[in-house]
Image: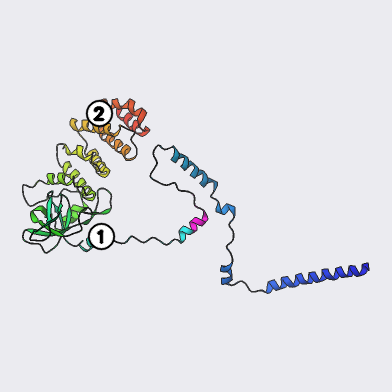
Amino acid sequence: MKRKVFFGILVAVLLFAIGLIQFFRTLQTLPPPTKREEEARPPAVRSLEETVPSINELEKTKNEMLAYLNQTEAPNRRLILPSTPNEVEETAKAPPSSPPPLTPRAIGRKKRQGLPMGVVLWDNVPVYDSVEKKRVIFSLRSGDVVRVFDDNAPSLAHVQPGLDIYLAATTKETQPAGEFLPDQDGWVEKTNLHVFEPDAAKEFVMETTPVTLGNDTDFSTFDFYDRAMKNPDPVVHRMIGPRMIALVLLHEDYSSSWATLYRDQDPRIRDAALAALNERGVGDNRELIEDLILRLTELTKFKAKGETELEVLSLLGVLKASQHPRVPAALASFKEDWEKTQSPALNEALQQILK
């Protein structure tokens, strides 16, 4: 009986071994998987090390969050969190964004870009609906730029506001002027308009050299720039501002316009004014030096930050370069207060003047 059992087990083991050998032989003879079968396979599971951000990335994010929470004012930006490999792949697959479609105004400006350019010389210039001047449809101000059609009447010009202006001296960008005016053509008195030749128009837009405007010998170009600086259109303001600065630089004496320019509501104009003043120098003009010191007081009533801090540094640079004896004596009164309220950079710049 025992012998029969032994032989039964031996036969079972042999059969199992033969089955294993046959199975592996069958695997070796199978064809390789096709491309479709490969694509149908489920993606391999990533390891924990591949999907979790590295320790260095997490430490960097932690430090950024702590700095963010310690600020007294929330910065106008978002923290950049470390990306996982999945997010990187999704970003790489995303199609590039197409530029936004042109607005009807932009299409109109593009169609009229070959027409002559004109600039309005006076404030409250009426724009009529026709050559018969039956109705005023809107009004223009000093500095507004228009395109001039070629069907002008003897005393009237057919115009439409809206030009793409390259702001060469401030943002280095092209921006549309006339966005606050109706996108509509009309008729204006020719005496209220200066029409440029093509080369002169390019010079007026691309450079800051003062250009004489108006056909009347009594027309004051300086007064025109002064009026145009009050134009509410920000693009016109940034186009006129640098030309006003260039015009003021032509004066041998220091114009009171400097005080207005480095207090302008547009920080780009303020920066340009201080840069021009720093390059020229303030000389021995006591009145201007006193006003620059007053401007310092205005900017440092509270802690100067960001653009304001840079503006204060520019003012200190202008005053230091003047080497006027009034400057150290006046700025000494700032020392004690600035040590408590202003940044180390401003205190260091002040100390350089007080040495």
The kind of residue on which mark 2 rests is Val
Q: Give the labeled residue for mark 1.
A: 106
Quarter assignment of residue 257: top left
**Left or right for 232, reference 11:** left
Please tell me whether mark 2 or mark 1 is closer to you in this view: 1
Q: Which residues are magenta?
A: 81-89
The relative height of residue 343 versus residue 52 in the rendered view (above or below) is above
Secondary structure under the numbered disc 1 in the rendered image: helix
Along the line of sight, which residue is nearer the eye, 316 or 141? Answer: 141
- Residue 327 circle label: 2
Is residue 340 highlighted in magenta? no
Is residue 87 highlighted in magenta? yes
Residue visible at 14% across and 40% down in the picture: 251
The answer to whether residue 325 is seen in the rendering is no
**Left or right for 182, reference 334:** left
Q: Residues within 10 Å of mark 2 (few under 14, many from 20)?
A: many
